[in-house]
Image (cartoon, grey):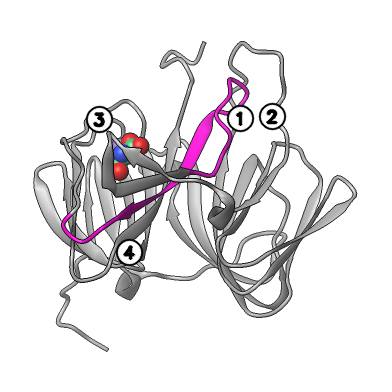
Amino acid sequence: MQHLGATRSSLKHDHLLQTPDTFIRTPLPGADGVEFIVHVGPRLGAGFVQMTAEFTAFGKLGPAPAQRFIYVLEGELEVAAAGQRHYLTAGGFMYLPQGTNHAVQASSIARATVIEKPYEPGNGNVPPGIVVGHEDAISTIALMGDEGLRVRSLMPDGPQYDFAVNTMTYDPGAALSMVETHVMEHGLLMLEGGGIYRLGDQWYPVQAGDFIWMAAYCPQWFGALGKRPAKYLIYKDWRRHPLGA
Ligand code: UGY
Ligand code: MN
């Protein structure tokens, strides 16, 4: 459908709002039966790649050039790694440290968020390990004591992990208690509901299906609107010195 050039998508120097009407699919090397919407990556100045992988039945991902985090949106993925097979359904996730030999294949039509980031070792001597889980098994934390804003941390928090992936669920009317401006960048996928996202000096209506990238220091705030909760999956780089040391 042609909308006379109108879209909510917007690219500014410190943020991107990418709405589904502007998604373009691309194949990637090594993958078979999978199309990718590459939402963000180094070409935009990001230190990570985030994409939506759309699998046909038995579609396979190619090898990961970096650490890989997979969160299943729909369908089922079979992931073989370290001599074990894991079956991930919607809300299931897996983290594979850089260099982990693994295979990802869809059992049926499936969709997943895939985040890849070159590993920054930090100065610890414990290597990161494979993580497998399901969001439903993770307890929620009320952000700054607000029971209307619940956070689940999908990645373990330890010195060996250099990024975090959380889900955040806002009851209707719940909002971040402050405009955040921080050194970490974010990749964000709206999973449910909607609201208003402040990014830089702009306020945008956003809804399930939208993707947002926030560069380091991009002023950000969200308030949920509507009659059902709003929920998003959010990535941030974490626990590393800004000088890379
Ligand atoms: O973890 C965060 O920085 C999160 N509170 N940011 C956000 O929701 N935009
Ligand atoms: Mn933030």
Query: What residue did someone put label 3 on?
Result: 217
Which region is colored magenta? 153-173
Closer to the chain start, of discs 2 and 3, is: 2
Q: Are marks 4 and 2 in contact (CB under 8 Å)?
A: no
**How far across and down, in percent of the image, does residue 236 sit?**
42, 37
Closer to the chain start, of discs 4 and 2, is: 2
Front-most of residues 192 and 217: 192
Type of amino acid under label 4: Asp
Q: Secondary structure at mark 3?
A: loop
Closer to the chain start, of discs 1 and 3, is: 1
Question: Is residue 104 toward the left or the right of residue 2 in the image?
Answer: right
Question: Is residue 243 toward the left or the right of residue 127 in the image?
Answer: left
Query: What residue did someone put label 2 on?
Result: 128
Q: Secondary structure at mark 2?
A: loop
Closer to the chain start, of discs 4 and 1, is: 1
Per the model, the C-alpha gap separating discs 3 and 4 is 21 Å
Type of amino acid under label 2: Pro
Q: Secondary structure at mark 4?
A: loop
**Residue 177 quadrant:** top left
**How far across and down, in percent of the image, does residue 194 sit?**
24, 65
**How far across and down, in percent of the image, does residue 148 sit?**
26, 50
Q: Are marks 2 and 1 in contact (CB under 8 Å)?
A: yes
Residue in view at x 69 percent, y 66 percent: 77
Question: Is residue 110 toward the left or the right of residue 245 in the image?
Answer: right
Per the model, the C-alpha gap separating discs 1 and 3 is 22 Å
Query: What residue did someone put label 1 on?
Result: 119
Per the model, the C-alpha gap separating discs 4 and 2 is 30 Å
| Residue 215 within the segment the image draws in magenta | no
Disc 2 C-beta below 8 A from ligand 1: no
Query: Which label was assigned to residue 210?
Result: 4
